[in-house]
Image (spheres, rainbow, N blue to C red):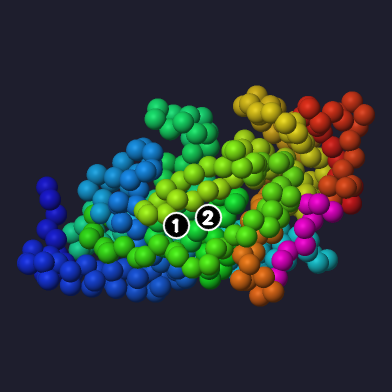
Amino acid sequence: MEKEKKTEGWNSNTRGKIAVMQKLKDEVKKLARENRMDLVGVASLDRYDHAPEMVRPQAHLPEARAVVSMAIRYPDAMFVNAGDGDAESIFSIETYQNVVIGKCLYNAALRLTRFLEDEGWKTLPIMVSGRWRVHPYKSISTNWCADFSNRHAAVAAGLAEFGLHALAITPQFGMRQRFISVITEAPLEADPMYSGPSLCDKCMLCIKSCPVKSIDPSPEKLEKVTIGSRTFEYAKVDHWRCGWSEQINNIPEEGPAFAGQKIGILPPDEGEIDDKQFLSAFYAKNAEEPFQAPMTHAMGNCMRVCIPPHLRGKQKPPRNYCRQMMKKRSFSKTDASPKEVRRYEVCS
Ligand code: SF4
């Protein structure tokens, strides 16, 4: 049964409806800020006209009228100092990035959902990024695809624009925030798309810092995505390569080394990676370091080194451990071919 719209004035004339939309949006933003969100924006559904059908807002909530995107910023020192200094600590970044900040986002999304539901509008909170369909599925032709993209929602809601690495960069915090989205039937007016100076100057640091060569910026391979009236281009990202480090911690230099992991396994330099290679590398590393492996965390060099042009000099860059430590990889003779999966040890 249709729930009664409690929002006063919605059933009146056009002026009444506009007033309702404005009041609702003000309340949504106020509630988000009261729940520790540093950024909040609204996207209209027409900005998803070019999105694949299965990942559109209305594929999740057929009555959808808007998407609310919210973000919480990372503490700067957590992001910069991870793995640095005498402590070489990665446990703080692991916990705050994945657990604490994730919980804050879920809490804000749930409270916003409750508020809009109580006003009579169907509302669906989306999870923070971290679950994917790793193979093409029905009409989704790409791999490692979330069922709803928080970074695309952030761009659609005017909070961010894409960098060459295909991640969302905001003018306020660059790469140092995490997003969540809420899809709602509530008639919230969209915020303008970001139209300021470009937040990516193609400095290529993200490409150079990736230890598994997951980002391919070749002009002929650039991906195009249209959101609202804007078309963005970003590099082709091989998500099997990215997951090789980010999801299963096979590259100690991106973080696990600071927890004591010594064994690393590199993917082949070229060509596609398949499930079997991915899993056998994962099991091989875990077999050698069974207790350490679950207590490690990869930090994502592409995120850490990226500072948009206007924040350079204001945001401190992290030390690029990856490239320093890569020089200290020790391959055994039999594992040395760059065309094969390669096991190595990191020397301290
Ligand atoms: S590191 Fe440089 S090239 Fe990569 S996304 Fe950031 S600004 Fe763009």
Query: Residue 155 has which mark?
Result: 1
Numbered tag placed on residue 162 in the rendering = 2
Left or right of 230 on screen, residue 90: right
In terms of image quadrants, where is residue 18?
A: bottom left
Task: From the viewer's side, name the closer residue of 225 and 212.
Answer: 225
Q: Where in the figure is residue 208, as x and y percent of width and height? A: 74, 50
Beta carbon of the mark 1 residue lies under 8 A of ligand 1? no
Q: Position of residue 150 (x, y in %)?
A: 45, 52
Q: Residue at 69% x, 33% y: name it.
A: 282
The tag on residue 215 is none
Under tag 1, what secondary structure?
helix
Q: Extreme left residue here?
A: 12
In this view of the protein, which residue sits in the foreground, 121 or 21? 21
Residue 318 in magenta stretch: yes
Please say if 18 is above or below 149: below
Start-end of magenta stretch: 316-324
Picture quadrant of residue 9: bottom left
